[in-house]
Amino acid sequence: MPSEDAPLPRHRDKSGPDPRPHSPPPAESGHSSNGAHPVDAPQSSGLSDRAAAFRLSIVPDMGFAAATAAARRLKKLRDEGVSSRSSARVAVLGNSTTSQLTSFLELFLFARGIDGVIYEAPYGLMRQEILDPESELYRFGPQFVVLAGSRRDLSLPPPAAPPEDVALAADAAVTEWRTLGRTVHERSGCRVIQNNFEPPAWRAFGNLEMSHAGAIGDFVDRVNRGLRRDLPEWLTLHDLDGLAASIGRWNWGDERYFHLAKLPCAPEHLATYAHSLAALISAHLGRGRKCLVLDLDNTLWGGVIGDDGLSGVILGAGDPVGEAYVEFQRYVRALSQRGVILAVCSKNEEVNAREPFERHPGMVLKLEDIACFVANWEDKATNLVRIAETLNLGMDALVFVDDLPHERALVRRLLPDVAVPELPADPTDYIQAIEQHRYFEVVSVTREDLQRTSFYRSDAQRRFTGSSAADLDAFLQSLEMHASCGPIGPHELARATQLIGRSNQFNLTTRRHSTTDVQRMTAHPQWVTRVVGLADRFGDQGLISVLLAEQQDDALVIDTWIMSCRVLKRGVEQLLLNHLVALARDRDLRHIVGEYVPTSKNGLVQDHYARLGFAPLDTRNDGATRWQLEVGAEWQPLSHHINGAAQ
Amino acid sequence: MNSLLAEVTGVIRDLFEDDQITVTESTRAPDVEGWDSLMHLNIIIAVEQRYAIRFSTAEIARLKEPGQNVGSLLDAIRSKTRTSS
């Protein structure tokens, strides 16, 4: 189920089977931005189709020129009214040229379904912007501030300094950066994402660079370790050093462009840099992917198990390709041990598909690592929907890995919310092909993440018929959910109205109140307005539910009840009802009345009030039903696993 | 020679996301709307990638000087592609 259920096209006609752009995306014709069609798209297609195809064309290895063109294209599409499900206000502060970085950041946020509103601090004014309470930065009101520092922002101790002085200088640098971060956090309430520092490629001390106190490599390392110590909750470190190392330090920094234009790294790696930041921001918005769905034949092993048999598949030591599959499985298992949920989606007889897991000595992955095992002859899109439902995940939580281009194309076409990475022909390259997308970025790893698979350790058949209540409870418990529930204030108004305007599925009455309507309700004593925000271990889900109710005589009548589908079955409805009953009792009311107005899209909540213990009141000719709940002393609060903070 | 101009025009059109842009060897940055110093840099970077060449710091600095035109860029590309092939 797509989160927040914005209407999604079921078919995207013009995205070919493989929309990876090694050539830049199709250009708009001319300056006529209104209604202009992409030059090489023969059929006329709507704006949302073009936006969806464009979103898919944004890939992390797209190179500088393609990313520059795509960033311009994005600006045009946004001018035409294309928008995403979430948005984020991000300020980027650096003492380098960040123009390309910020436009790429906007691009990669968009690829992840986030409209980035970006503030780029004037060149070289990082400290001033933070320290001046009247600066543009604070007027902008960032949710995220990226401190895009580099080693050039560090004052280095002289190489001959005694080790104590080097240690003091490193501590001073850590303290200074922590103070800058804390200042901007306290003044704007933002989350701070701060680069660690990358040493230069050259090493004056050669092999001793990391061990001689006062060598640049040693000093940068000390500062980086200091930054990791006692990390406050509001601060996220962005591992720029790791990024530079993974690319290779000589390649990472193209010093020509630093000397010429103060670019923070080589132009061809700016996209990687921006993508890495976008992945972090997206994780903080709760939009990291959670589940890796794997094909089997030629994905986890070489060959076709149904044809080649157990002894015929290529897997295990002794065969170089077999070893490549083993290494890929190790990578997948490491992800799983970190908390990524694994599923299998294979076109096979189930008994054949399971056999290697049970009997092949080369298999690293075992059946108990797989939370949901689907092997049949139905199409993969249908099976992916089934997997998502079984695991109680949104489609946008899935990553689907399959060696067959047509299967990937089918899933991209029918389920655009599922991430489908291109897979190279050589299984040795699978790991990097998946890893470069940074799908599974998380903000923290908890003990529960590391034990995640145990929540799912039971046989797949039972999962199909629904997990046992005990398992589901344990899972929900492990999510460490926190909710905030309060009236719609000025800060929540835009998001609340957006939910009212967009939600179709979990929407009991589909009344599209305008911002002005809602604002009027918030000021009216007879009306009760509520928004619910939810955060869990995966990050902040943001405001995900809205409720509007009017006091009429001795009843509280629910006019609107909306929830984002991505938090379905998490207990938010129960939490909100408990809150509502307490509120009704405070007002000495006797009933809560709810209404369900059927539409073509909201069948999901047909039994919403029945499930919450309401009794049917009446049914109108058009099928609308009304429900009533007595809020007397005998009513018991509903149980859920969310820690609430109601006001 | 004309084909090089056509290719570079293609690079520029891609970067600008604008298929109507036409340049000649005498075109200079101020002649094209939106061709600012950032776009100038973007063009040089894209050209380096397109032809797998590497300009020296001084060459890029020279291309950024006022008075340089598309012809200067084509000359710079030619000097690199000739020596490398």
Image: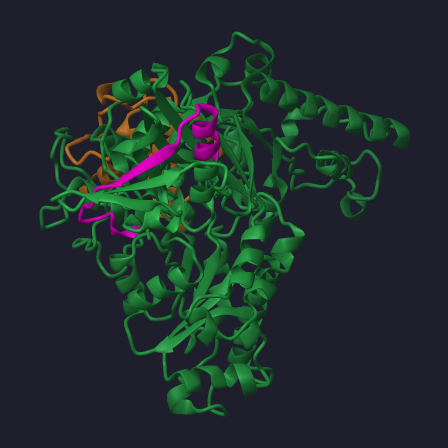
Chain colours: A green, B orange
Task: State left or right for residue A476 relative to residue B79.
Answer: right
Q: Residue at x 29, y 66 (%)?
A: A382
Say if A191 sits above or below A201 in the image: above
The range drawn in magenta is: A579-604
The quarter of the picture where residue A487 lies is top left
Say if B85 sits above or below A68 in the image: below
Frontmost residue, A597 versus A436: A597
Q: Residue at x 48, y 19 (%)?
A: A121
Q: Residue at x 34, y 29 (%)?
A: A555
Q: Residue A595 colored magenta?
A: yes
Task: State left or right for residue A323 relative to residue A347.
Answer: right
Is residue B81 visible to us here? no
Q: Residue at x 78, y 48 (%)?
A: A207
- Where is residue B12 drawn, in percent x and y? 26, 35
Q: Residue A10 colored magenta?
A: no
- Where is residue A61 drawn, in percent x and y? 42, 50
Frontmost residue, B29 versus A304: A304
Q: How many marks?
A: 0
Frontmost residue, B19 versus A141: A141
Can you name the residue that lies furthest to the top here?
Answer: A134
